[in-house]
Amino acid sequence: MLLITRRSKLLRIIAVICIILPLLYLLFVRHERKRLSNYQAAEYNQQWVKPFLSDGPGNYEPQDLKPRIGPGENGQKHILRSDQKNAAQDSESEFGMNIACSDEISLDRSIVDTRDPECKRWNYPTKLPSTSVIIVFHNEGWSVLLRTVHSVLNRSPEHSLTEVLLVDDFSDKPHLGKKLEDYIESLDSRVRLIRNKQREGLIRTRSRGAQEAKGEIIVFLDAHCEVNLNWLPPLLAPIMRDRRTMTVPIIDGIDHNNFEYRPVYTYGHYFRGIFEWGMLYKENELGYKELSKQEYPTEPYKSPTHAGGLFAIDRNYFLEIGAYDPGLLVWGGENFELSFKIWQCGGSIEWVPCSRVGHVYRGFMPYNFGKLAKKKKGPLITINYKRVIETWFDDKYKQYFYTREPLAQFLDMGDISEQLALKEKLQCKSFDWFMKEVAYDVFDKFPELPPNLHWGELRSAANDRCFDTSGNGPPALMSLHYCHGLGNNQLIRLNEKGQLGVGERCIEADNQGIKLAFCRLGTVDGPWDYDEINKTLYHRVYQKCIALHPQTGHLSLMPCDNNNTYQQWIFKQIRPNYR
Ligand code: UDP
Ligand code: MN
């Protein structure tokens, strides 16, 4: 008996030691890591020397680049033979891009230097901070993923590139299994692969990459990029000056069909990231206010937001501000969350004209959102937007979002109390401050939205069918379809100023009929009057009413006739079944 109790006591002591010691060790490692990197952050700041222009090539400019010959070299387009059409089409539908074409192009191909020639003369700090380039991926094509890696290895300063960290978001394509591990093994010891145990979506996967990274600076890239010449030092220099600066390269386009590398802006023009009130990402040409702050046109400039996939940031700073809101799921809105958080909580975003990275814009999104999306009721991206605006917008601005996206009011965004607590803890400024001091040009393009007089489906009294965009983009004729109450194509809004909107588009009229059109930038006014009694939609300029043609179903403007049911339209709010 005594023996048993003594033994169990011993076991208990061993068990306690087994648990406590590793715990203490982990705490120590964490503390050391933080202490060390804060120290390093301070150190790299001391290494910072203001970039300067020289007459000749700058200190990181590549010398004696040998011309290369082959498919797609120099960023040229590569056209497949006609007998490869099937392979091309298959890969387009599997990956949203022509992997068959990409497969024929060297992983080390040369690309066209899209920088302003002045960029070649900048000199950056001679010692750069350690950098982890993080590439998250889900079911990407082999050659685009690896061309991203190769371009980073080929075009980054050796001493600064600590690692290329690949984070696999639970891909299930065979080529991304052991074959990828073997390839990485043979490539360069700085390339490292980690894998998620379940699908997390790109947002959480990037946050995980940041946790796991070893570098002082982390740079995120999509898994279908090609970095351009001397892309990294210009991204790092502003962060060395101020660790709360996030930097963004200028994102050139790589054609998803023929892999031609093209500059995104016409020569000498620069843009910055903004947004419209439905939280779609937009860009606006750099205005006088920003240009006047620059000594040289190739210097970095401030931007309110960024597109999302490609940027550099101090690793510890990113973790201090909570990385991405972990409540954001899979894809969308995270670029705004990070932008608002950085600006409102004391940091800044700079776009860097001398750092260029090509990105393949896909034809369509080839993946679904997996199990994560199934748990949620309603459109996931709009749920993300709602979390972001409820955390960062002031009440006045939230209204613009709900005016533009009326169904968002019914969505369950989950718990945001931790986000609000973080905002409090970091003593972040108001959205009004952000709009006035940073994003002052948003209103030039997307003015304050007046309330909707009516929103919902717009039904014909004559045939019980509803206005529908049929999924077309502008310009296109509007038509009527059976009413399904599901929003998007049939969710029509009439605002107090007479603008008839559907999504980010407007409904206008010309002599061909009633059309889906691009809304005019800088105004929220429109030509429409809705007559509540006669149910007519009257065009103030043409002084006519929207009419349905009884035989053809065509929508056009006709002389108003209050007794004609073909001119009667009924707005009915949609109540989605989200709960
Ligand atoms: N991605 C991911 N998990 C996902 C969806 C995407 O890791 O659930 C990766 C994807 O492979 C890519 C990056 O996240 O490297 C950005 O996604 P994508 O390129 O589809 O976004 P887009 O450029 O179209 O905004
Ligand atoms: Mn992408």
Image (cartoon, rainbow, N blue to C red):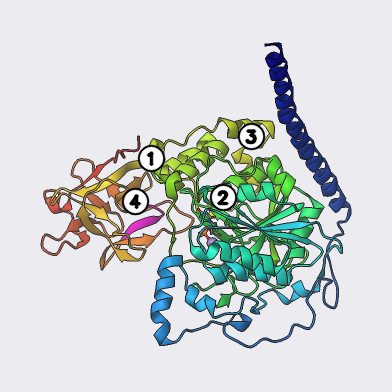
Mark nearer the viewer, 1 or 2: 2
**Which residue is at the front of the view, 127 or 275?**
127
222 above or below 73? above
Q: In the picture, residue 48 is in which quadrant?
A: bottom right
* C-alpha separation, residue under disc 1 versus residue under disc 3: 27 Å
Q: Nearer the viewer, mark 4 or mark 2?
A: 2
Answer with mark 1 or mark 3, whichever residue precedes in sequence.
1
For the residues marked 1 and 2, what is the alpha-carbon distance in whole angstroms? 25 Å
Please provide the residue range marked out in magenta: 499-508
Q: Residues within 10 Å of mark 1 (few under 14, many from 20)?
A: some
Q: Amino acid at mark 1?
A: Lys
Residue 239 lies in what quarter of the image?
bottom right
Q: Residues within 10 Å of mark 4 (few under 14, many from 20)?
A: some
What amino acid type is highlighted by mark number 4? Asn
Give the residue number, with chain letter if any, for mark 3. 423
- Tag 2 secondary structure: loop
Q: Are marks 3 and 2 in contact (CB under 8 Å)?
A: no
Mark closest to the chain's N terminus, 3 or 2: 2
Give yes or no for contact between labels 1 and 2 (Cβ–Cβ under 8 Å).
Answer: no
Q: Which residue is mark 2?
A: 196
* Of 34 and 386, the residue lying toward us: 34
**Left of 234 or right of it: where is 376?**
left
Q: How much space separates mark 3 and mark 4, taking CA atoms?
A: 33 Å
Q: Label 3, secondary structure: give it.
A: helix
Look at 62% across and 75% down and name the residue there.
107
Q: Main secondary structure of the magenta part?
A: strand
Residue ID for mark 4? 488
